[in-house]
Image (tube, rainbow, N blue to C red):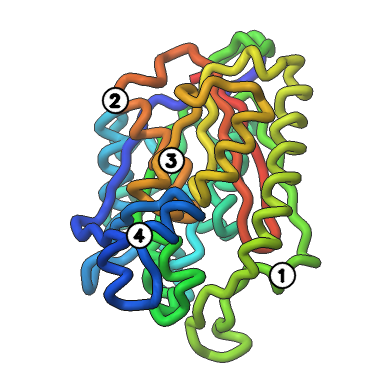
Amino acid sequence: MVMRSVIVGCGSYLPARVVTNDDLAKMVDTSDEWITQRTGIRSRHIAAEGEMTSDLALAAARAALAHGNVAVDELDLIVLATATPDQTFPATAAKVQAALGMTRGAAFDVQAVCSGFIYALSVADNFIKAGQARTVLVIGAETFSRILDWNDRATCVLFGDGAGAVVLRAEEGEGTAADRGILSTHLHSDGRHHDLLYVDGGPSSTQTVGHVRMAGQEVFKHAVVNLAEVVGEALEANGLTPADLNWLVPHQANRRIIENTGRKLKMDPARVVMTVDHHGNTSAASIPLALCEAVADGRIQRGELVLLEAMGGGFTWGAALVRF
């Protein structure tokens, strides 16, 4: 017997304000056609004034707990992935913990930018496998609109705000790929590529928040290679092939990257969950947002094999293979 981390609840939250490509074309020199052709993005949600990452995270957390019929006092741990915390400290996870009324266990943040949710999922899974937690809330939440240069048309058109969350619960499995839960997680990083995707500020360097800076074409090239490799790694680790997969739930950065990964896996496009058109890139929130949308509309069913993958600044990248 082995201990598996089973997803028992899924929830999400998107701010009310929707900004379309045409709205952005009034702010910077761009067009709906230009953005859509290059990225697949048509609209994104933007947090309201005063609406913070913790607010988005809390709403998604409550939805996940309700969906899983999990009480707050059952939680042992909260792991929150974000690159846009409310404050330098305390952790945004601690604010969510307090707002939920959770007074036991622990709560902390994980920062791996767009790969953040995969990293957080891996941390939570390992806490469960080590016997240090039985029920864990994992959240990806971002207000990326707060770190965008709205005069930089290369980046301001790409990102949006949102939050997604899952509740993991320890359940015994047989140790085979037929088990429900997280089968394996695979994390990577390569700090040599810092200058291709970064924020030009921070407490220790500039004492400011800074803005996102990106060399888009170079990031694209690395993403295509790194994601293909980590997807293969996850399948091989479990003795599986692409034909065994029911669903691919990728990080929602760019339609072309998503389609490329799907083609390499020879997956039916209908089996690739894509929300980038109406969410934009929500960084650490993108995978749980996409996952929860596909669960809510009935596409992803219990027992199906789901592959999650992402790449972000750092560079960081990773994958998780989950039998839902």
Amino acid carrying mark 4 in the image: Asp
How far apart are labels 3 and 4 at the CA level? 26 Å
Q: Is residue 83 above or below residue 168?
A: below
Amino acid carrying mark 3 in the image: Pro
Q: Nearer the viewer, residue 153 or 212?
A: 153
Disc 4 target residue: 32
Amino acid carrying mark 1 in the image: His
Disc 2 target residue: 297
Q: Residues within 10 Å of mark 4 (few under 14, many from 20)?
A: some
State the SS at label 1. Answer: helix
Outermost residue toward the left in this view: 16
Question: In which quadrant will I find the N terminus?
Answer: top right
Disc 1 target residue: 194
The answer to which of marks 3 and 2 sits earlier in the sequence is 3
State the SS at label 3. Answer: helix
Which residue is depicted at the point 63% across and 29% down?
Answer: 263
How far apart are labels 4 and 2 at the CA level? 28 Å
Q: Nearer the viewer, residue 219 or 130?
A: 219
The answer to which of marks 3 and 1 sits earlier in the sequence is 1
